[in-house]
Amino acid sequence: MAGEEHYQLPPISSQEELTQAMNVILGRIAERLKFLETENAVDILKADTTLSAGQAQVFVDAIGGAITITLPKSIDNIFKRLFIKKIDSSANVVTISAGDGVTIDDVVSKTLTSQYDVLTLTFDGTEWWIL
């Protein structure tokens, strides 16, 4: 499949070489699982929340009332993508707040008003930008 990495092991002639090859394979698997765990996690939020640097994909369910999501102001977010999506069909508004001293495309907040509205953002160290 496209994007997959394939590894071909050299011929193995001893138990030591087999152990070394298995350690390499297990290390690569562990690295990939760690990446998938952090990059593909989806959080479903139902209340006002300040996002952490590790959150990258957020679904917001505002069926119980209006919700404010405050973006993290962290060096860990520089040039990472952040996806925020309203998943309920209620009239309740989801407000995305940039936080203290930060803006989103030069404004302090954006709103998601309809089901399936989504914001895709990136942070440059001083400001959030809509992509």
Image (cartoon, grey):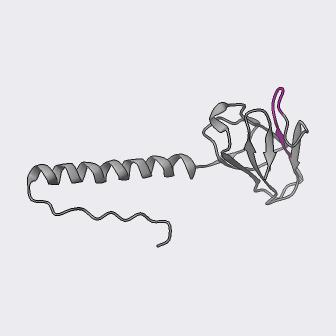
Percent from the top left, x then y, of residue 67?
81, 41
Percent from the top left, x then y, of residue 116?
79, 60
On the rendered structure, is 24 left or right of 97?
left
The magenta segment is 94-102
Percent from the top left, x then y, of residue 129?
80, 45
Q: Residue 97 in magenta?
A: yes
Task: In this rendered view, identify the residue nearer to me: 1 or 92.
Answer: 1
On the rendered structure, is 127 left or right of 13?
right
Farthest bottom residue in view: 1
Task: In this rendered view, identify the residue nearer to me: 62 or 131.
Answer: 131
Q: Residue 17 in magenta?
A: no
Q: For the point 83% across and 44% down, which residue is it? A: 65
Q: For the point 28% across and 65% down, which residue is it? A: 8
Q: For the point 66% across and 38% down, which residue is it? A: 77
**Residue 18 sits in which quadrant?**
bottom left
Task: In this rendered view, identify the residue nearer to me: 56 or 80.
Answer: 80
Farthest left residue in view: 14
